[in-house]
Image: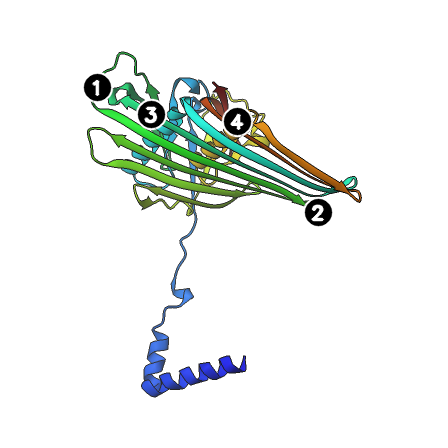
Amino acid sequence: MRQLLLSFLSLFLSISSLYSQLELRKIIENLPTCEQKQLPQLVSLKSILPCKLFSNLATSYIGISDVGVDSVTAYHQAYLRALSLASLKNGFARGMSDFYNDSNGAEQTTSNYEELCELKANLNLPVNAIKVTDSIKLNTGEMLLFLTVDSSNVKSENRIILNSSVTIYCKEGEDLDRKELFNKITIDNKLYYSAKDSAEIEKSSYLISNNRWLRKEILFNDQKIETDFYKAFYETDDGCTIDTTECKQKGTNTLDGLWYAFINNYYSQLSGQLKDRYLKVKSVGDQYENKTISLNRESGFFRFGCTLVDGALFENKFITRIKANFQ
């Protein structure tokens, strides 16, 4: 500490020899301070959601843009996201889970569960096989797009090619009655048009801890999308018939936007249904002095298809219900 102080004094004296006291004061006064930087205030947004967002969803694909983007970006973002869900009609999945348990007698002291799931899917369709059946601009600025895909008897040299990659990671631990749950979802979607040289690319990651928001990063065509300044609140349109039974327990908070809640719930359900297909590949354990340690590992690799059945909203919690089938 003494040596550090001497070094600082030596540096200060050398600076003082180069500048007069008046010049030093001017330099210090002109240095930027934290008080000069004003943080943006949170903006509260409210919107009514249409009934068609909650029923008969198996006949179309839904894409939702982020809050706060311009109209052109919102449309392209929603279009790309709808196609990414359409690609899951025929996808590949690879997953693995580990469960570690360390217990002392009848009292469990430590447990740890980790799960990693990777989804790969693609589309290669004529441009005129994809129809936008409806587009709705919400008061929050978000764009809802409804697409249908019909490739029967359609021939066109202009094609749309989409490559989608999703990674879902989950870690759940318990130590001395303290539970921790960590989730991370990363999404990489690339959309190509055969008639164009350019591509539309979205890369995003969502981090959640104990069902509370940590951080999200969204890049669309190399442009960073900032949504942290907005808080969104939603209500359903009058006359909607919605089963909200599961919303309270399984719903995802919509404060950070509808798409975030939508895909967080969607992919969490999908990874859960995929996990039921895993096969046990390793199980080891040991016991000594009333202490038991065990490790179980499961994994799987298979083709799957996924369909969105319906959705529900209750007290700013959104839930999707999906159905996965396997080959």
* Lower sequence index among marks 1 and 4: 1
For residue 233, the mark is none
Dot 3 falls on a residue whose secondary structure is strand
In the picture of the structure, the residue carrying the numbered disc 1 is: 156
3D distance between C-alphas at marks 1 and 2: 62 Å
3D distance between C-alphas at marks 2 and 3: 48 Å
3D distance between C-alphas at marks 2 and 4: 30 Å
Q: Position of residue 177 (x, y in %)?
A: 70, 45
Residue farthest top in this picture:
153
Query: Amino acid type of disc 2?
Result: Leu
Q: Position of residue 124 (x, y in %)?
A: 30, 24
In the picture of the structure, the residue carrying the numbered disc 2 is: 176
In the picture of the structure, the residue carrying the numbered disc 3 is: 123
Image position of 113 with respect to 312: above or below: below
3D distance between C-alphas at marks 1 and 4: 35 Å
Q: Are marks 2 and 3 in contact (CB under 8 Å)?
A: no
* Lower sequence index among marks 1 and 3: 3
| Quarter-of-image position of residue 22 | bottom left
Q: How is the image coloured?
A: rainbow
Query: Amino acid type of disc 1?
Result: Ser
Dot 4 falls on a residue whose secondary structure is helix
Dot 1 falls on a residue whose secondary structure is loop
Q: Position of residue 148 (x, y in %)?
A: 34, 20
| Quarter-of-image position of residue 284 | top right
Query: Amino acid type of disc 3?
Result: Leu
* Lower sequence index among marks 2 and 4: 2
Query: Amino acid type of disc 4?
Result: Leu
Dot 2 falls on a residue whose secondary structure is loop
* Lower sequence index among marks 4 and 3: 3
